[in-house]
Amino acid sequence: MAKVVIISGAGISAESGISTFRDSDGLWENHKVEDVCTLGCLKTNREETVTFYDGLRVALEDKKPNRAHLQIAQLKEKYKEQIAIITQNVDNLFEKAGIPHEDVIHLHGYMTDLECESCGHVYNAGYQRTIEVFEGSCPKCHSDQIRPFIVMFGEAAPKYQELYQSFDDCEMMVVIGTSGYVINTDMYLSPKIKKSILNNLVPSNALNDELYSKVLYKPATEAIDEIAREINAFLSDAVFKELL
Ligand code: APR
Ligand code: ZN
């Protein structure tokens, strides 16, 4: 299992032109969470909810991974099982950077997928609106109850199990671009974690940065070289110790 866990949030994709949630002009400043991202929205406000995510999916097509995604992809390629990539993001920028989809744990869903509410089938929508994919019906059971493959507030998040498990063997945690309001990364800083890095643009009231061994308040694309150096040093050191 992985010695290094990299957990990211909206901030890592901000420089690729995807809005964060809680920064000024973030998505939750312009849309009400209760209207489009809360359990029950699909019952009470289906059209607006589907349209909201359709818009984000279409807009994803021309978004490009930035240096942070690309450097992480290189590290993953180099160290494979030694690094776990966990993200709260529903974009596909790690995948666009070259990481196989199955190697990225998307805790909150995946924008380019759709899910059938009738039979549970999950299928790829590319960058199309819901209605454009198989005319808005499930390719398996033909139901028209199709939803974005997104975990909304109040809904179960099955991938959290993988998040918890990834900390079993973790010795270094790297946090990039998350305010910590949904997943408070402070609570994973057990004594087993020998090194921890927190990178955000600005301090967040939800996180206690004194708990981390290194804190970088700067854009992820500027912090990533130092982060990569630290990960390389940590993992080469770990390999060296295993050889002794
Ligand atoms: N580089 C690094 N960090 C950045 C950058 C950047 N260029 N720009 C913004 N940030 C940081 C901000 O300082 C903030 O701490 O990214 C964080 C973004 O926080 P949020 O908007 O709260 O995003 P996130 O923590 O990913 O939200 C968690 O909330 O609404 C839900 O499901 C949604 O997955 C999302 C979850
Ligand atoms: Zn179906």
Image (cartoon, rainbow, N blue to C red):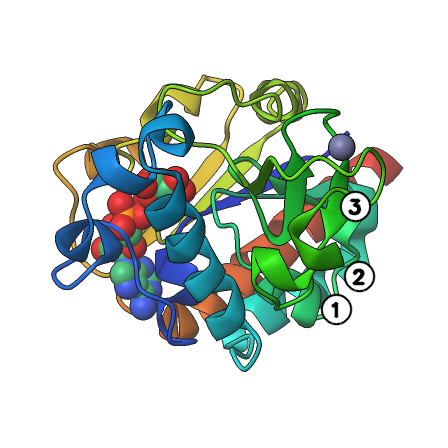
Instruction: Please give the name of the residue rendered at 58% of the width and 26% of the height, measured from the top-left corner.
Output: 163
Binning the other alpha carbons within 10 Å of mark 2 as few (below 14), some (14 to 19) or many (20 upward) gives some
Helix, strand or loop at label 1? It is: loop
Mark in front: 2 vs 1: 1
Q: Residue at x 62, y 26 (%)?
A: 159
Query: Is the CB of mark 2 within 8 Å of ligand 1?
Result: no
Quadrant holding the C terminus: top right
Secondary structure at numbered mark 3: helix
Q: Secondary structure at mark 2?
A: helix
First-in-chain label (2 vs 1): 2
Q: Kindly identify which numbered label has been placed on residue 77.
A: 2
Residue nearer the viewer, 21 or 123: 123
Image coordinates for residue 212, horizontal then vertical, percent: 32, 37
**Amino acid type, residue under disc 1 in the picture:** Gly
Residues tagged 2 and 1 counted as in contact (Cβ below 8 A): yes
Closest to the camera, between mark 2 and mark 3, is: 3
Q: Which mark is residue 98?
A: 1
> Which amino acid type is marked by label 3?
Glu
Give me the C-alpha separation between circle 2 and circle 3.
13 Å
The residues tagged by marks 3 and 1 sit, at their Cα atoms, a distance apart of 12 Å
Q: Which mark is residue 102?
A: 3
Q: Position of residue 233 (x, y in %)?
A: 62, 55
